[in-house]
């Protein structure tokens, strides 16, 4: 056994030495066309299309639930791929690079939420027997009005989530093709729109498994290289970068230089790692509120909840969450590494201000990682955004075509009419997202965090009480949705006014306590409270629903 | 009429009509009256058997399931938020060593009684602060304090060289600042040396000022950190609190999920619900 390990190491070391060889010296960080990354990116997109065509969905059930034929590990990978967007791939390292320990609230929030999902919802949602969050809420709260508003909210969540992704796609297209940001967003957005329209009903779930393998490889390989190259513990880079963090805090000298020849050393910077440091402008409350809002948002995101239907049994739903979380953690354990190396490699003022959202790629460049590997990394980032965006555009447009157009506006619509409406909705949504992405309202992770806050205070309370309390009825549901919706509109309105220089009364108070990235910290508990209070005042939940909930969802047999 | 039809499985959607809630596509209809009748009240009592309440589990399976869920949630909550509260409780605002020294020197700089060593220490403090953030490199008061302190340290002709370098540095960061590095004793510290060209500012002699009251809030903001034994203990190279939050906590989340899956699978087997329920 030891011989095998030795042979593996002997094989691995020369490979690591080759790919860690400096090849970026003298190359500008951005502003030029990069052929290799462009080829790798194109190859990845073609591969996704090919896998999609090979596993084309035969019908709605097959599309949504992949024929319920995916294994637990496969479903876990699909959950992870569906989950890992530009916000995970690029945004987390960016927020840690800029805000230090505060960025870890995103890492913890986006993983801890899966515990809530598993413990409170996963198998119960699967047993309830619906395909979408909108369907669940419409049926559980026996209200077409709630179905309509949930569909609107689901579309809006998809919209906000997609804006962040388009920002990430724009940055990566800018890096690969050397175009200005605005042109990159338009070109990148058009490519992802075309991809979505072509791939529409292709094998999404199996495609996501392939995408996961590509994403995680693209993310992990440079991490091994960076730790190996700079003599840290490279066999487990997630542990190896610990010394980088300590070096940043203490300002320790290293014998290494970045691709520009600048010393790999910072001035002592405890603010990078110390909790809620005043230098980052973020405090204890903001850490806790962001973390909590992201956790409950995770458990309320429609496209995440929907994933529990791709497995054959409720038990598989549970195991797929566990596998999914493990696969997600492989990336999340590693993301702070890019932030730490990025910090120490870009510390020289000569490097200048870098776009934080591209710090993952810049880090690999500054670390003189082989251009092929950096190209793979950038292609992985675009793929992460593509897989999520296409899923979100499909989710948003199908929420419109199925839940609003077919079930409310035109119940007599034919299949062709529904598909046409879905395609129109996809295009309208993509164009709208593109326009908002051009405004560069915030960092990718923050824009995505907004989607989580909305989901956390609108959909999460409805699912939580809808599953665990049969007394939660239509009146309570409407009240809950109203409270969540009110906070959403209120917070976003203040945010947009502040962005465009309009001074509103109490703007400082709202900007701190009801910030768009975490207003769910208070909105969600209030929505739950409203649900409980108004449920007590309304008509009881109809017995068919109570019976279904008791027998089918919780296994209470009389 | 409560209820007319009991049918939920297979329901695709619900529609609301006047006084009616309709499930399904018209083949199964359940209607809800606005005013409860005697018959309805008795039926409501029957329907309590279908009550689902997180805090009142009605079957042995649900009791054990909810116990496992509650334990998982408590561990999840304490591990996530409890640790951050602990971090908050034990923290002490701790100034960096250079700032502690600077606070002793600052009054002497103001009244002109600082020694050469103290001026070197002050200049290095300014430099360390300027190197922390690109935004600080735009702080003119800080750059003036640095340039003024270095100016005061240098001999006569060195002062002219400094002013010439400061003027040139505004447009060319490749300016020769070796003499400043030597004067500050940072020739072995590339991180500090890299900041010097960006720390200079061209000021006229009458504007020179080695200190500025405006610097205190900036220095407090960047030089004082929330530290404790949790942040100062190094494990695997990490400050412990960072290791815990970035790695251990995530691992714990996976373990909570893993253990719960095994527990619930065991419960399913124990209550023979695998086939009927799953």
Image: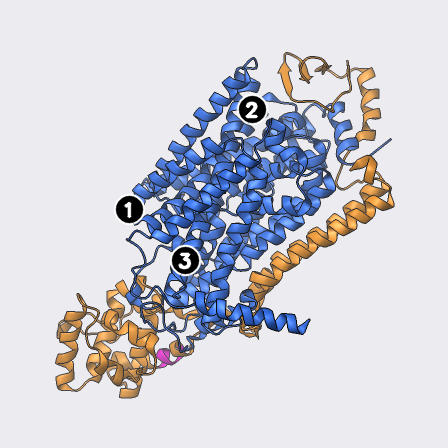
Circle 2 is placed at which residue position? Answer: A403
| Mark closer to the chain start, 1 or 3 | 1
Q: Is residue B36 magenta?
A: no
Residue drawn at 60 percent across, 26 percent down: A59
The chain painted orange is: B
Residue drawn at 57 percent across, 49 percent down: A292
Crowding at label 3, few (<14), some or many (≥20) Cα neighbours within 10 Å?
some
Tell me: A366 left or right of A75: left
Circle 1 is placed at which residue position? Answer: A180
Which quarter of the picture shows residue A330? bottom right
Secondary structure mostly seen in magenta is helix
In the depicted structure, whether residue B39 falls above or below residue A290: above
For the residue labelled by badge 2, is the local secondary structure a helix, a strand or a loop? helix
Total marks drawn?
3
Q: Which one is closest to the eye, mark 2 or mark 1? A: 1
Instruction: State which region is magenta.
Output: B100-104
Could you say which is closer to the camera, residue B84 or residue B210?
Answer: B84
Q: CA distance from mark 3 to mark 2?
A: 45 Å
For the residue labelled by badge 3, is the local secondary structure a helix, a strand or a loop? helix
Rendering coords of residue B242 (x, y %): 54, 65
Q: CA distance from mark 1 to mark 3?
A: 23 Å
Residue drawn at 35 percent across, 54 percent down: A355
Residue drawn at 56 percent across, 36 percent down: A54
Could you say which is closer to the camera, residue A234 or residue B46?
Answer: A234
Residue A514 at least partly seen: no
The chain painted blue is: A
Which quarter of the picture shows residue B195? bottom left
Tell me: A188 left or right of B77: left
Circle 3 is placed at which residue position? Answer: A372
Residue A303 at least partly seen: yes
């Amino acid at each position: 056994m030891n011989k095998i390990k030795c042979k593996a190491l002997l094989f691995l070391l020369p490979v690591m030495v080759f790919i860690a060889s400096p090849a970026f010296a003298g190359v500008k960080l951005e502003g030029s066309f990069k052929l290799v990354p462009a080829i790798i990116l194109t190859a990845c997109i073609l591969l996704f299309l090919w896998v999609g065509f090979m596993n084309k969905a035969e019908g709605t059930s097959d599309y949504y639930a992949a024929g319920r034929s995916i294994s637990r590990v496969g479903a876990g990978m699909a959950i992870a791929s569906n989950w890992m967007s530009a916000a995970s791939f690029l945004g987390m390292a960016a927020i840690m690079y800029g805000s230090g320990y505060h960025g870890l609230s995103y890492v913890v929030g986006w993983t801890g939420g899966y515990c809530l999902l598993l413990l409170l919802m996963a198998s119960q949602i699967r047993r309830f027997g619906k395909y979408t969050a909108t369907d669940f809420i419409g049926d559980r709260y026996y209200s077409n009005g709630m179905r309509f508003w949930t569909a609107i909210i689901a579309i809006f969540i998809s919209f906000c989530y997609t804006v962040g992704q388009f920002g990430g796609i724009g940055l990566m297209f800018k890096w690969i093709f050397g175009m200005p940001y605005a042109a990159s967003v338009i070109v990148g957005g058009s490519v992802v729109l075309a991809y979505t329209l072509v791939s529409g009903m292709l094998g999404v779930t199996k495609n996501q498994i392939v995408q996961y393998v590509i994403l995680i490889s693209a993310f992990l390989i440079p991490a091994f290289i960076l730790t190996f190259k700079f003599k840290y513990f490279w066999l487990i880079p997630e542990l190896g970068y610990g010394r980088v963090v300590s070096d940043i805090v203490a300002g320790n000298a290293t014998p290494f230089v970045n691709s520009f020849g600048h010393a790999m050393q910072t001035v002592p910077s405890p603010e990078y790692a110390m909790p809620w440091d005043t230098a980052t402008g973020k405090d204890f409350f903001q850490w806790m509120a962001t973390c909590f809002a992201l956790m409950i948002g995770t458990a309320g995101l429609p496209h995440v909840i929907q994933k529990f239907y791709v497995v054959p049994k409720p038990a598989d739903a549970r195991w797929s969450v566990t596998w999914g979380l493990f696969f997600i953690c492989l990336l999340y354990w590693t993301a702070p590494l890019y932030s730490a190396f990025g910090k120490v490699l870009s510390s020289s003022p000569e490097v200048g201000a870098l776009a934080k959202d591209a710090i993952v790629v810049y880090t690999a460049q500054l670390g003189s990682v082989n251009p092929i590997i950096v190209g793979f990394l950038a292609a992985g980032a675009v793929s992460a955004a593509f897989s999520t965006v296409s899923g979100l555009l499909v989710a948003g447009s199908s929420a419109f075509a199925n839940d609003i157009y077919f079930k409310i506006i035109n119940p007599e619509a034919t299949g062709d009419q529904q598909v046409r409406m879905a395609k129109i909705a996809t295009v309208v949504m993509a164009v709208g997202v593109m326009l908002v992405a051009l405004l560069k309202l915030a960092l990718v992770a923050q824009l995505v965090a907004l989607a989580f806050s909305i989901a956390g205070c609108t959909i999460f309370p409805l699912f939580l009480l809808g599953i665990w309390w049969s007394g939660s009825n239509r009146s309570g549901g409407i009240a809950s949705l109203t409270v969540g919706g009110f906070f959403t509109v209120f917070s976003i309105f203040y945010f947009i006014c502040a962005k465009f220089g309009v001074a509103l009364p109490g703007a400082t108070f709202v900007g701190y306590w009801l910030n768009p990235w975490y207003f769910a910290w208070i909105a969600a508990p209030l929505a739950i409270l409203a649900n409980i209070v108004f449920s007590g005042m309304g008509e009881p939940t109809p017995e068919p629903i109570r019976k279904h909930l008791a027998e089918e969802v919780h296994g209470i047999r009389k | 009429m409560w209820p007319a039809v009991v049918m939920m499985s297979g329901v695709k959607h619900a529609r609301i009509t006047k006084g009616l809630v309709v499930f399904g596509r018209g083949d199964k209809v359940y209607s809800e009256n606005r005013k409860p009748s005697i018959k309805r009240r008795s039926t409501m009592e029957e329907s309590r058997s279908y009550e689902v309440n997180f805090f009142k589990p009605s079957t042995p399976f649900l009791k054990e399931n909810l116990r496992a869920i509650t334990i998982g949630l408590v561990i999840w909550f304490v591990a996530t938020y409890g640790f951050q509260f602990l971090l908050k409780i034990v923290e002490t605002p701790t100034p960096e060593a250079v700032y502690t020294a600077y606070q002793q020197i600052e009054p002497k700089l103001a009244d002109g009684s600082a020694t050469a060593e103290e001026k070197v220490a002050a200049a290095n403090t300014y430099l360390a602060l300027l190197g922390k953030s690109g935004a600080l490199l735009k702080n003119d008061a800080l750059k003036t304090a640095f340039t003024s302190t270095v100016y005061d340290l240098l001999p006569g002709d060195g002062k002219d060289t400094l002013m010439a370098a400061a003027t040139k540095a505004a447009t060319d960061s490749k300016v020769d600042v070796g003499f400043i590095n030597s004067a500050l004793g940072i020739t072995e510290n590339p991180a500090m040396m890299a900041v010097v060209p960006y720390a200079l500012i061209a000021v006229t002699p009458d504007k020179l000022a080695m200190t500025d009251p405006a610097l205190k809030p900036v220095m407090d903001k960047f030089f004082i950190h929330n530290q404790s034994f949790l942040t100062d203990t190094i494990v695997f190279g990490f400050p412990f609190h960072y290791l815990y939050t970035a790695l251990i906590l995530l691992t714990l989340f996976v373990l909570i999920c893993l253990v719960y899956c095994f527990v619930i699978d065991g419960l399913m087997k124990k209550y023979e619900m695998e086939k009927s329920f799953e």
